[in-house]
Image (cartoon, rainbow, N blue to C red):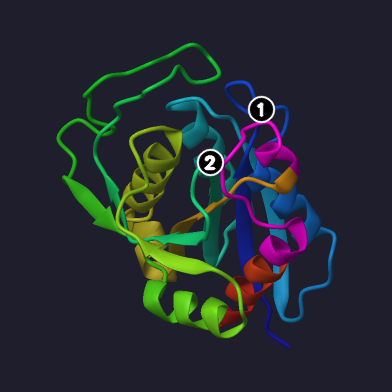
Amino acid sequence: MNRTRVLLTGFDPFHDDPVNAAWEVVQEVAASDLAGIDLHVQQIPTVFHTSLDVLAQAIRQVQPDVVLCLGQAGGRAAISIERIGVNLDDARIPDNAGQQPREVPIVAGGPAAYWSGLPVRDLVTRLREAGIPAEESWSAGHFVCNHVLYGLMHLLQAPEFQTQGVVGGFIHVPYLPEQAARHPNTPCLGRAEMVRALRLVLDALKR
């Protein structure tokens, strides 16, 4: 029986948060059984450029059919399926290495933007039908999340990945309740709901 090989990533904690919701969810999903999926996970550092080096190395090691990157978006109330990554780093705060690029391209001379390879609207519909808050997002921001989305889609333009038809994309998740407790009046989503959402997404991406 063919199994879809998936590389699933999440970021390490950044700024003043002791955990990152994305990585917490990735770990929980990795500990569960996923029919028809050969799942590989990788933590990504919240650091400009180094994040893409780690991601590229993982892709070449795993040789996945699907690369799905997760990031945390404090302040959002729903699972956000990103549509587009733009060729711009413009950090509001420093990354975990103290870098704070302002208005610089991710790839010099690269396209202004790349579309996600995910079936965004279908995934949003699938999650909403399951009773999970979900939305299409037209901005992954200008921090390391957008950096990774754009960098991923740029990497997948290489002939070796085009030939294999590797699918890539990015999803933002809200804060976990324990994080929201440290950020009053900030939306959150329960851990179980986020895990269920990610399992539904992965099932939809099976080949």
Residues at discs 1 and 2 in contact (Cβ within 8 Å): yes
Q: Which residue is drawn at 35% across and 64% down?
A: 162
Residue identifier under label 1: 17
**Quarter of the image holding residue 102?**
top left
Residue identifier under label 2: 74
User: Badge 1, how many Cα within 10 Å: few under 14, some, many 20+?
Assistant: few
Q: Which of 124 and 154 is in front in this view?
A: 124
- Percent x, y of residue 96: 55, 19
- Percent x, y of residue 182: 68, 31
Secondary structure beneath dot 2 equals loop
User: Badge 2, how many Cα within 10 Å: few under 14, some, many 20+?
Assistant: some
| Left or right: 188 in relation to 48 | right
Q: Residue at x 59, y 30 (%)?
A: 45
178 lies above or below 156: above
Secondary structure beneath dot 1 equals loop
| Residues shaded magenta | 178-195
- Percent x, y of residue 142: 33, 35
Quadrant of the frame with the N terminus: bottom right
Q: Which residue is drawn at 85% across and 59% down?
A: 31
Residue 205 appears in the picture as rendered: no
Per the model, the C-alpha gap separating discs 1 and 2 is 10 Å
